[in-house]
Image (cartoon, rainbow, N blue to C red):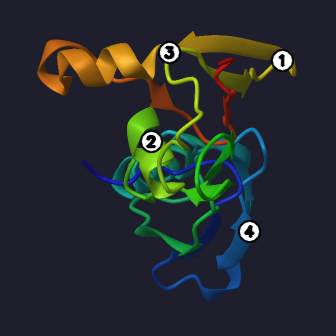
Amino acid sequence: ADYKLAPRDQVVFEMFNEVDLQTTQRLSSQGEMTLPLIGTVPLAGKSLREAEQFVRQLYIDGGYYVDPQVILSVAEYNLRFVQVLGQVNRPSSIEMPIEQDTMGLVEAITQAGGFTRVARTDSVQVRRRRPDGTDQQFTVDVREFLNRGSSRGEEFQLQPGDVVFVRERLI
């Protein structure tokens, strides 16, 4: 699948034969970019081609150009991380691949060195910040997922900014 633009990506806007309109901006936290003549436009969630067609149509609908050739490119991707803390061998920030919107919980734990011998694998905590600023908590039984095999169920998917905490097992 094509990369979808995300908030804080740095995007270059160009229009063929219109050098004065070129601009490079970081998308806002809402995924918007301010473009010459047409103002603020939402681009997050669109592929580059979809965003180009969307912006092109705005210039046509606004009566600014008849057949504009809009070119968008990503100058710098916003880095996206999940934090894996607690009873893992290398607690750390794990960078999410640019081409993925989510990352499997087991993959993140594996990149953090796997569980320690005293990890409580049946009660892994995940904290996610909602767009409204409130936190959402999940408790995931990773042991059960691993025991039944990935073919029998969906792995819990982490989103950028999630914090994973693996508690210690009480012995």
- Which residue lies under the disc numbered 2? 101
Q: Residue 132 carries which label?
A: 1
Question: In the figure, 37 relative to 131: above or below?
Answer: below
Residue 58 placement: quadrant: top right
- Along the line of sight, which residue is nearer the eye, 102 or 40? 102
Residue 163 placement: quadrant: top right
Residue 125 placement: quadrant: top right
Kind of residue at badge 2? Asp
Q: In this view, does 146 lie to the left or right of 43?
A: left
Crowding near pointer 3: few (<14 within 10 Å), some, many (20+)? some
Q: Can residue 54 be seen in this view?
A: no
- Which residue lies under the disc numbered 4? 25
- Report if the CB atoms under discs 3 and 2 are less than 8 Å apart: no
Of the numbered discs 3 and 2, the one sitting upstream in the chain is: 2
Question: In the figure, 6 relative to 95: above or below?
Answer: above
Crowding near pointer 1: few (<14 within 10 Å), some, many (20+)? few
- Which residue lies under the disc numbered 3? 122
- Along the line of sight, which residue is nearer the eye, 68 or 142? 142
Q: Tell which tag, 3 or 4, sits nearer the viewer.
A: 3
Kind of residue at badge 1? Asp
Q: Residue at x 60, y 12 (%)?
A: 139
Q: Residue at x 54, y 54 (%)?
A: 112
Q: Tell which tag, 3 or 1, sits nearer the viewer.
A: 3
The local secondary structure at tag 2 comes to loop
Question: In the figure, 73 relative to 65: above or below?
Answer: below
Q: Marks 1 and 4, how far apart in space?
A: 25 Å
Question: Residue 69, position in %: x, y?
Answer: 40, 69
Q: Residue 98 carries which label?
A: none
Crowding near pointer 2: few (<14 within 10 Å), some, many (20+)? some
- Along the line of sight, which residue is nearer the eye, 122 or 10? 122
Kind of residue at badge 4? Gln
